[in-house]
Amino acid sequence: MLNRVPKGDALYERALRTIPWGTQTGSKRPAAELRGVAPPYIVRGKGCRIWDLDGNEYIDYKNACGPIILGHAYDRVNAAAMEQMALGAVHSAAHPIEVELAEELTRTAPCAEMVRFLKSGAEVTSAAVRIARAHTGREKVISSGYHGWHDWSLPRTKGVPAALRELTISIPWDAGRLEEALGQCRGEVACFILSLPYDRTEGEVRDFLRAARALTEREGVLLVYDEIVTGFRLAMGGAQERFGVTPDLAVFSKAMANGFPIGAVAGRREVMAAWDATTISSTFGGEAFSMAAALATIAELREKRAHDHLWRMGGRLMNGINAMASDVGLGIRAEGLAPVFSVRFEGRDAEEGRRLSTAFQRELLMRGVMPYSVWYITYSHSEKDIERTLQVLREAMEEVKAEA
């Protein structure tokens, strides 16, 4: 098969000699089964489109694994960051913009009475867990979902001390399992930290969050929302605003600054006060140009009522995928919440499902659509872009069906 990305593949082979994995982010590693089609490198992005090292153009639904919410190289956000950059990135004392952004978040997220900033999702989830332990005096954590690479989050990974392995209890998205875990560790659990799965309906999410709130309150356990993905994407105030269930702590990152590196821990004042009892500090926590980008992103989302657009465009795409898959007769289904949804592949067995997924992704990439396990909608995806994507989706489905 013709290699669409020869320059990209060649550079990736070169990268493997000096960079473990060949890249900095696990989910950006080229998949072996998509070699020659999936681009190892993206060199430019604008709006909802990206271009790879070989000059191929794609309508982007991966969006840097979630940070892009307005669009790549979004003018208002870039201008705000560049204006601040001209004044310096970090200084020898705090910058006033830290106060401005913290106050903005207290007006935006329902749980936020106090806020601290760091630089990544893994950092802020780890900070939230430490704060929960400091506040409660307890050590165990119940976790649902992925929360980054730190020791507490992946305790059974090589390189993590065995002494930490029993302190994190991982459970699926299930209220019964949460109640069971809380009962088995009564009086020992500092917090339950959860991220939303990408394949549940609004009703299912709301019901689980209500159950989690009631169960954690009953046991004196802090409820922590990992809003790294859902923050600023489902609503201005994230999942807690959309579903009306307020946690004790929440963490944000990704879409908060439309791609600039920043993360935030927000929560109730009495819980956040535990910061005084421990140590969490970072030289780059107060880096100013990402904060300027965050303020501009939040302002643009609010002024343009961008979330109406995200839900409408995402819903149109999901409905189109499901209707076409049914019409063509393929086991493909879009599930979840319209601004960020998953695409599931079903075959006679798991292996057939994987083959279907690979074939479908290959056909999309060949036709200029960048898919992902999670599809992210941005404000820059226009109705025309969605219509073009639906056309490509049908062509891809028909090709996969013909080859089956």
Image (cartoon, helix red, strand yellow):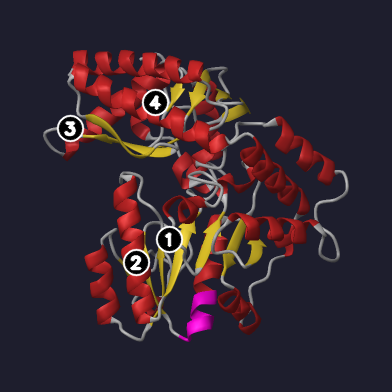
Q: Residues within 10 Å of mark 2 (few under 14, many from 20)?
A: many
User: What secondary structure is found at the residue carrying circle 2?
Assistant: helix
CA separation in Å, label 4 and label 1:
27 Å
Q: Which label's residue is closer to the chain start, 3 or 4?
A: 4
Q: Residue furthest left?
A: 348
Q: Amino acid type of disc 2?
A: Ala
Q: What secondary structure characterizes most of the magenta part?
A: helix
Compared across the picture, whether 263 is left or right of 336 comes to right
Q: Amino acid type of disc 3?
A: Glu
Q: Which label's residue is closer to the chain start, 2 or 4?
A: 2
User: What secondary structure is found at the residue carrying circle 1?
Assistant: loop
- Name above or below for residue 150 compared with residue 215: above
Viewer-closest of 149 and 272: 272
Q: Residues within 10 Å of mark 3 (few under 14, many from 20)?
A: few
Q: Residues within 10 Å of mark 1 (few under 14, many from 20)?
A: some
Quadrant of the rendered image containing residue 371: top left
The residue carrying mark 1 is: 245
Q: Give the range drawn in magenta.
A: 131-137
CA separation in Å, label 2 and label 1:
9 Å
User: What secondary structure is found at the residue carrying circle 3?
Assistant: helix
Residue 316 numbered tag? 4
Residue 205 numbered tag? none
User: What secondary structure is found at the residue carrying circle 4?
Assistant: helix
Q: Which residue is drawn at 56% across and 47% down?
A: 236
Q: Which residue is drawn at 44% across and 35% down?
A: 30
Task: Measuring from the top left, give residue 212's x and y in whole percent.
Answer: 34, 66
CA separation in Å, label 3 and label 4:
28 Å
